[in-house]
Image (spheres, rainbow, N blue to C red):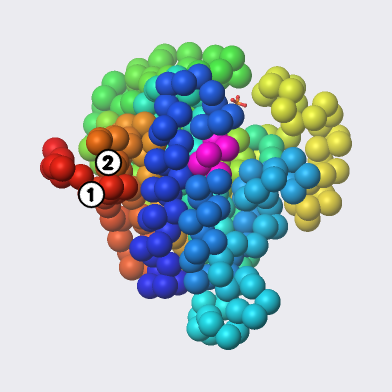
């Protein structure tokens, strides 16, 4: 899988990031998202693959493109057998978030990215559009921290695993009212909190690398993005756990319906019989091969954002693969026209 589409998925996230970055700082989050979706879809449909969106912009009725169930790639065509190789005809599942952190782009804030994860059919958990309680931690703490433990206990474990004091740890938490108690607890435990307004995929990813000065992600974000984060952490060997949050009273955003009971029914109809199950990275991204790709829209901990210059743009992407066991940072100069000078720094 990696051999056939590895390089091309870099271009998919790059194109989405470039399109979205043109709307950076313009206060138009929906447009920043929409152009990323269009660019991602257009580039994806040029790849010799047979893909199906399992996590996307929503159900077909609400999302005109990259909706759940949409088929993407050249080998989805009826006559694909005539021009696609047998391995390209094998169905693959794709989870996308063309503009993760739409507010970050709209307001020119750091940490937004275009992301996707790919696996073989059935290899990515088709998460409902609910919330997810998340815990991400560095590889050294994998399987040792636990979402069922308190933040205080987990911080103690991370500090032991990393050989540093709790005071030296940084935990990313999204600034939301629902996290007030959590933030208080982390501070009382002695750790430092980095509050972010949006973009917890980048936060989870930061835990997978040393040198980012991020040692944990805690709190509740969106469930579909949890699967994308899990795919990255699975490939990086970092810790990730997620638990669905289906009670509207917990998040109070008005985005997941009005009743807990109705949401439980929806989960049951999706085949989720234990709504409180804690999923680890291997369950959320269970495929044998998992590929993750991201490209910075605005600069973050791991990737620089899109920088435009006369006649082109420069991007930084990251591709992580369970197959080749690599995390590749890819620095690309896109030359829309022949540039007068290629900027090296
Ligand atoms: C967003 C977004 C995150 O979760 O806030 C969202 O910034 C859900 O939280 O990156 P709210 O509804 O409270 O805003 C993410 O999309 C991903 O988990």
Residue at 52% over, 77% down: 88
Q: Name the residue beneath numbered marker 2.
A: 311
Q: Would residue 236 be seen by someone viewing this image from the given angle?
A: yes
Q: Is residue 283 left or right of residue 197?
A: right
Please state, as top left, top right, bottom left or bottom right, where the C terminus lies in the image.
top left
The mark tally for this picture is 2
Q: Which residues are magenta?
A: 33-37
Residue at 70% over, 57% down: 69
Which label was assigned to residue 224?
none
Q: Is mark 1 within 8 Å of ligand 1?
A: no
Judge whether 188 appears above or below 146 on screen.
above
Q: Would residue 285 be seen by someone viewing this image from the given angle?
A: no
Q: Magenta stretch containing residue 35, yes or no?
A: yes
Q: Is residue 288 left or right of residue 249?
A: left
Q: Name the residue beneath numbered marker 1.
A: 338
Q: Pointers 1 and 2 in contact (CB under 8 A)? A: yes
Judge whether 281 appears above or below 100 on screen.
below
Residue at 74% over, 48% down: 60
Count neighbours of disc 1 (C-alpha within 10 A) and say few if under 14, some if 14 to 19, many if 20 or more.
few
Q: In terms of image quadrants, where is residue 141?
A: top left
Q: Magenta stretch containing residue 311, yes or no?
A: no
Residue 84 location, x and y as percent? 53, 80
Which residue is more in the foreground, 276 or 82? 82
Residue 119 location, x and y as percent? 52, 64
Q: Is residue 250 left or right of residue 174?
A: right
Q: Earlier in the sequence, mark 1 or mark 2?
A: 2
Question: Secondary structure beneath disc 2?
Answer: loop
């Amino acid at each position: 899988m990696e051999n056939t589409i590895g390089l091309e998925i870099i271009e998919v996230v790059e194109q989405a990031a470039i399109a979205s970055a043109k709307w950076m700082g313009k206060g138009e989050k929906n447009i920043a998202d929409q152009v990323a979706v269009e660019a991602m879809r257009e580039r994806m449909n040029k790849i010799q693959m047979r893909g199906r969106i399992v996590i996307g912009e929503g159900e077909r009725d609400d999302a005109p493109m990259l909706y759940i169930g949409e088929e993407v790639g050249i080998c989805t065509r009826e006559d694909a057998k005539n021009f696609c190789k047998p391995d390209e005809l094998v169905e693959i599942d794709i989870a996308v978030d063309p503009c993760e952190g739409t507010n970050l782009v709209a307001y020119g804030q750091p940490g937004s990215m275009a992301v996707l994860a790919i696996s073989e059919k059935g290899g990515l958990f088709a998460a409902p559009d609910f919330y997810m309680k998340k815990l991400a931690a560095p590889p050294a703490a994998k399987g040792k921290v636990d979402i069922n433990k308190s933040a205080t206990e987990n911080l103690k474990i991370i500090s032991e695993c990393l050989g540093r004091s709790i005071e030296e740890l940084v935990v990313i938490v999204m600034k939301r009212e629902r996290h007030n108690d959590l933030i208080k607890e982390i501070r009382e435990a002695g750790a430092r909190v980095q509050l972010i307004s949006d973009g917890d995929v980048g936060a989870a990813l930061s835990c997978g690398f040393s040198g980012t000065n991020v040692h944990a992600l805690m709190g509740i974000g969106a469930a579909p993005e949890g699967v994308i984060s899990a795919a990255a952490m699975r490939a990086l060997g970092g810790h990730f756990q997620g638990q669905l949050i289906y009670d509207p009273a917990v998040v109070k955003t008005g985005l997941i319906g009005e009743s807990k009971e109705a949401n439980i029914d929806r989960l049951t109809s999706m085949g989720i019989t234990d709504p409180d199950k804690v999923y680890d990275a291997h369950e959320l991204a269970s495929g044998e091969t998992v590929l993750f790709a991201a490209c910075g829209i605005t600069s973050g901990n791991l990737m620089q954002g899109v920088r435009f210059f006369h006649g082109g743009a420069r991007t930084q992407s990251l591709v992580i693969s369970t197959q080749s066991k690599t995390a590749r940072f890819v620095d690309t100069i896109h030359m829309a026209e022949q540039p007068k000078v290629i900027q090296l720094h």
